[in-house]
Each structure stands twice: as C-alpha cells, then as structure tokens.
Image: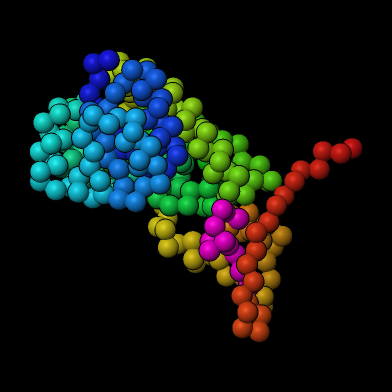
Amino acid sequence: MNIKIGFAGNHKIGMESLKILLSYNIKPRVLLLPKKGDYNEEMKSLLPDIPCIIGKSFREKKNIELLASLELDYILSVHFPYLFTKEIIKLPKIGVLNLHPAYLPFNRGWHTPSWAIYESTPFGATLHWVDEGIDSGDLALQKLIPVSWSDTAHTLYQKVLQCEIELLKEAIPYIINKNLPRIPQPHEGTFHLKKDLETIRRIDLNLEYSGEKIIRLLRALTTNNWNEAAFFEVDGKKFLIHIEIRENNKE
C-alpha cells in the first residue's frame, strides 16, 4: 500500500486502530506513543522495525527532522494525549487526522460522555482534521450515537469506543484514495477542560434540584473512576455516588 502514514495512539482503542490499519495493508512509517501508555509495548510489538517516538519528544528538532524525512501523507492520532505544534501539522502532505469521542462541534476537549449527558448535547464519534486549536479542525466523517436515559458516562464511553472503530473502518477507503472530506467545523458547540468536571461534582444538600437535573448529574458522573463521582458531605464525611439505571421492559 503506497500510503505513507504516521500513527499516534494510546490505550486499547489505539492498538485496535493500529490493527485495523495493518489489516488493510497500511503499515505506518513511525509510531508516536505517550510516555506511560498502557498499550505501548503491544503496539511496538506489531511494528518492531519502525522508528518509535515516546512522549513529547516528537516536538524536538531531531524528531521533527525524522518525521519530515519520512515524507508522510498523513499522521493519524487516536486518543493521543498531546497537542501537535503548527510545525508538525504542516509536515504531512495531506494532513493530520484525529479520532475524537464526540460529535463535533459539541464536546471538544475532555470527558465527552459526561458533558453530553449533563448538557444534553448530540453525541457520537468524529474523525477530523487537526489544526492549532483543540478539536476545532475541519470535519471529515461523523457518526451519531443515540443516548438513552439508562446510559451513564461509563456505558456511553463504551459505545463511543465501538463507534470510533466503525468510523475508522469507514474512513479507510477515503484515506487510501486521498479524498477524505474537509467540512469547516461550525463555530458554535461546547468545550471543556479536564478540570471542569470538578465544578459539578458537589451536591449541596441545602439546595433543591429538579428530578431531571439530578438524574442527568448522577448519570454524567458515573464513570469507571470513583474520583470523578458526584458527592455530598455530611458531618465532615464525603459520600460518593454512582448509579445504575435499567429500563423496565416488563408489561
């Protein structure tokens, strides 16, 4: 396959995405991996004979020169935790692509399932072109995910991971043929930093909440991490809350 691609990945979805590329006979020319990625060794084992750049060192002069020498068509980023500089964005002939677990322009940034539930915004997966902003580049392909009232941030995240894999498979022919769309991203939408989740976690027992608001809050803060859970405090003690919701299908 005469496609020159650099691959920047993290987590299990990064490894699965790399396997998809290889199944289409697209072999990356370089790997970019996070400093402490949980699937680094597995991804390196799939491509033991290519250069591997760890952590933020891809921004160093020697590695920028390495990337330039490979004459890449694309860099594909899958849950890669670092931002690309303007200099690196300009290196690939066609561009840098990012697979993002949200339906852009909604939920740029962090904790996308949580904010989609809490703010009742459309949710899904997006493959987009990378610019100098955060998840603000032109859109390539998108898929919507229906959000159920029984969904929590945790269940919704599992759904979007599968949706991202499906979206990548749909994108492969476009990548091969070098004809992925570039649709300008609307300026409206939502954006959240990682720290923003802390602003909604505390439930004040002296306040009254509507039923819908408290249910959305608890769903949004039921992740796989108790440190992100909603909480209330009584007598100096903190109580964390996770919820499970099941639709009653019995007649």
Task: Locate residue 120, reporting x and y percent.
Answer: 57, 49
**Horizontal arrangement in the rendering, residue 167 relative to residue 2 (left or right):** right
**Horizontal arrangement in the rendering, residue 211 relative to residue 158 (left or right):** right
What residue is rendered at 43% in x and 52% in y?
110
**Horizontal arrangement in the rendering, residue 210 relative to residue 174 (left or right):** right
What residue is rendered at 37% in x and 18% in y?
24
Q: Specify start and end residues of the magenta stretch as a single range.
A: 222-232
How many numbered tags mark residues here? Answer: 0
**Horizontal arrangement in the rendering, residue 244 relative to residue 104 (left or right):** right
Examine the rendered structure and indicate whether residue 173 appears above or below residue 184. above
Q: Is residue 231 magenta?
A: yes
- The residue furthest bottom is 235
Q: Residue 3: name its quadrant.
A: top left
Task: Locate residue 220, reporting x and y percent.
Answer: 58, 54
Task: Locate residue 102, reporting x and y percent.
Answer: 46, 41
What residue is rendered at 42% in x and 55% in y?
192
Task: Locate residue 58, reporting x and y percent.
Answer: 20, 45
Indicate the quadrant containing the N terminus: top left, top right, bottom left or bottom right. Answer: top left
